[in-house]
C-alpha cells in the first residue's frame, strides 16, 4: 500500500519559478511513490482575498493548467478543489475547539504574516480576520481529512505542520486513536530568490518569472535583473555570487555554469551578453511547459474533467475519514 501524501496551492496567481523548483519539480518526481492528493485551496485563498472572488475563481483553473503543464499526471494525482469538500469545513470547526487564540498568534508563520499585514495596512493588526488567524486549523483539516501521512513542505512551513500534529495529538488524547499524525517531506530545494535579489520570489514583489511568461516578457525581466553593483564596465571582474543572472543560470543553464563563472570573475563576460545567454536558456527551459500549457488552454473541458474526477475521489476519501471522526466524537447520530 502506498502512503498518502497531501499538499496544495492557494489559487491567487500563476505559478512562477519559485513554485516550480521549490515544490512542483519535487511533486512530479514523487507522484509515482504515493497516493497523492493535490488541493487547490480556494477557501484558504479567500482568507485574504475575500473581497476579490473573481481572482480566486479564475486562478483555480489557471494553476491547475500550470501544474498539468509541468508534468503532474492526473492519472497519478487526485486534483481537487477545497471548497467542494464540505468535510474539510466540518473538521475545521471541530478542530477550532482544540486550539487557543494565543497558540495561533504564537505560530511563527502566522506571526510573520500578521507583522507584514500590520506594516502594510498600518492599523495595528485590526485588519486581521478570524479566517486568516485560523488558517493553520484549516490546513490541519486539509491534511487529516485525507489521512495524509506525509506532507511536502519547505522549512518555513514546518511550524504549520507542527501545529497540525499538536491538533492530532490533542484530538486523539480526548477521543481515542482516530487520526494519523503526519510527517514532513522536506523540499530538497531552498526558496528561490527573486530577480531583484530578494530572498523570496513573489507576485506582490514584482520580481518573479512565471511559467506562462512569453519570450518578450522573459527578455524584459532578465534585462532588468540585478547584477554585481561593483561591475561598472564590461571588462570589470565581478563576483557571480552577487549576480542574479548567474543565480538563474544555475537553475536552467548548468552545463555552461563553470565557463560563465570563470569568465565573469576574469572580466571576460559582459552583463548584457550574459543576460542574452540566460534569456535563450530560460526560453528553452520554458518552451515545453508553454507547449503543454497551450494544449490545456485550448481544451478547458479536459481541465474540468480532471478537477471533477479528482474532487470526486477526494470527497470519497474525506467521507470515510469523517465517519471515523464523528463516531469517535459520539456525534454519529442515527435519526
Image: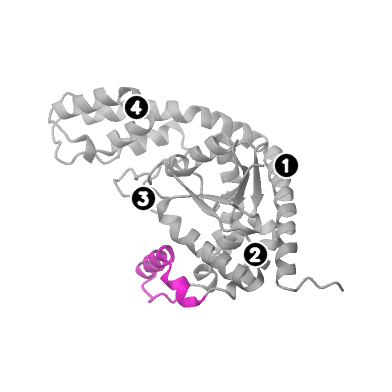
Is the residue marked by circle 3 packed among few (<14), some (14-19), or many (20+) residues within 10 Å? some
Q: Earlier in the sequence, mark 3 or mark 4?
A: 3
Q: Earlier in the sequence, mark 2 or mark 1?
A: 2
Is the residue marked by circle 2 packed among few (<14), some (14-19), or many (20+) residues within 10 Å? few
Mark 3–mark 2 Cα distance, whole angstroms, equals 39 Å
The residue drawn where x is 36% and y is 72% is 122
Mark 3–mark 1 Cα distance, whole angstroms, equals 34 Å
| Residue 102 falls within the magenta-colored stretch | yes
Question: Label 3, on which residue?
Answer: 200
The residue drawn where x is 75% and y is 53% is 316
Residue found at the very far right of the displayed protein: 335
Give residue 331's quadrant in the image. Answer: bottom right
Q: Which residues are magenta?
A: 100-126
Q: Do we see residue 114 in this rendering?
A: yes
Q: Are marks 2 and 1 in contact (CB under 8 Å)?
A: no
Q: Main secondary structure of the magenta part?
A: helix
Question: Label 1, on which residue?
Answer: 305
Mark 4–mark 1 Cα distance, whole angstroms, equals 38 Å
Mark 3–mark 4 Cα distance, whole angstroms, equals 22 Å
Q: Position of residue 290 (x, y in %)?
A: 52, 31
Amino acid at each position: 500500500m502506498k502512503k498518502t501524501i497531501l499538499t496544495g496551492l492557494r489559487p491567487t496567481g500563476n505559478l512562477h519559478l519559485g513554485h516550480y523548483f521549490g515544490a512542483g519539480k519535487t511533486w512530479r518526481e514523487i507522484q509515482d511513490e504515493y497516493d497523492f492528493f493535490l488541493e487547490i485551496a480556494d477557501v484558504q485563498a479567500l482568507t485574504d482575498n475575500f473581497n476579490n472572488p473573481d481572482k480566486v475563481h479564475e486562478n483555480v483553473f489557471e494553476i491547475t493548467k500550470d501544474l498539468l503543464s509541468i508534468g503532474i499526471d492526473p492519472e497519478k494525482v487526485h486534483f481537487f478543489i477545497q471548497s467542494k469538500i464540505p468535510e474539510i469545513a466540518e473538521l475545521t470547526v471541530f478542530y477550532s475547539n482544540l486550539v487557543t487564540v494565543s497558540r495561533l498568534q504564537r505560530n511563527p508563520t502566522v506571526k510573520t504574516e500578521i507583522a507584514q499585514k500590520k506594516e502594510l495596512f498600518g492599523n495595528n493588526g485590526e485588519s486581521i480576520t478570524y479566517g486568516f488567524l485560523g488558517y493553520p486549523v484549516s490546513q490541519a483539516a486539509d491534511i487529516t481529512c485525507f489521512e495524509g501521512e506525509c506532507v511536502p513542505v519547505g522549512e518555513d512551513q514546518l511550524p504549520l505542520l507542527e501545529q497540525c500534529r499538536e491538533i492530532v495529538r490533542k484530538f486523539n488524547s480526548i477521543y481515542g486513536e482516530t487520526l494519523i499524525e503526519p510527517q514532513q517531506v522536506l523540499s530538497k530545494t531552498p526558496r528561490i530568490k527573486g530577480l531583484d535579489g530578494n530572498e523570496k520570489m513573489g507576485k506582490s514583489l514584482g520580481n518573479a518569472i512565471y511559467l506562462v511568461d512569453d519570450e518578450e516578457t522573459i527578455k524584459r525581466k532578465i534585462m532588468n535583473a540585478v547584477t554585481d553593483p561593483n561591475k561598472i564596465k564590461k571588462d570589470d571582474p565581478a563576483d557571480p555570487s552577487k549576480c542574479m543572472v548567474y543565480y538563474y543560470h544555475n537553475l536552467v543553464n548548468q552545463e555552461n555554469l563553470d565557463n560563465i563563472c570563470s569568465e565573469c570573475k576574469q572580466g571576460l563576460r559582459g552583463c548584457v551578453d550574459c543576460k542574452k545567454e540566460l534569456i535563450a536558456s530560460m526560453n528553452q527551459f520554458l518552451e515545453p511547459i508553454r507547449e503543454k500549457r497551450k494544449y490545456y488552454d485550448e481544451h478547458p473541458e479536459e481541465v474540468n474533467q480532471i478537477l471533477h474526477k479528482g474532487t470526486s475521489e477526494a470527497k470519497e476519501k474525506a467521507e470515510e475519514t469523517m465517519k471515523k471522526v464523528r463516531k469517535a466524537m459520539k456525534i454519529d447520530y442515527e435519526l
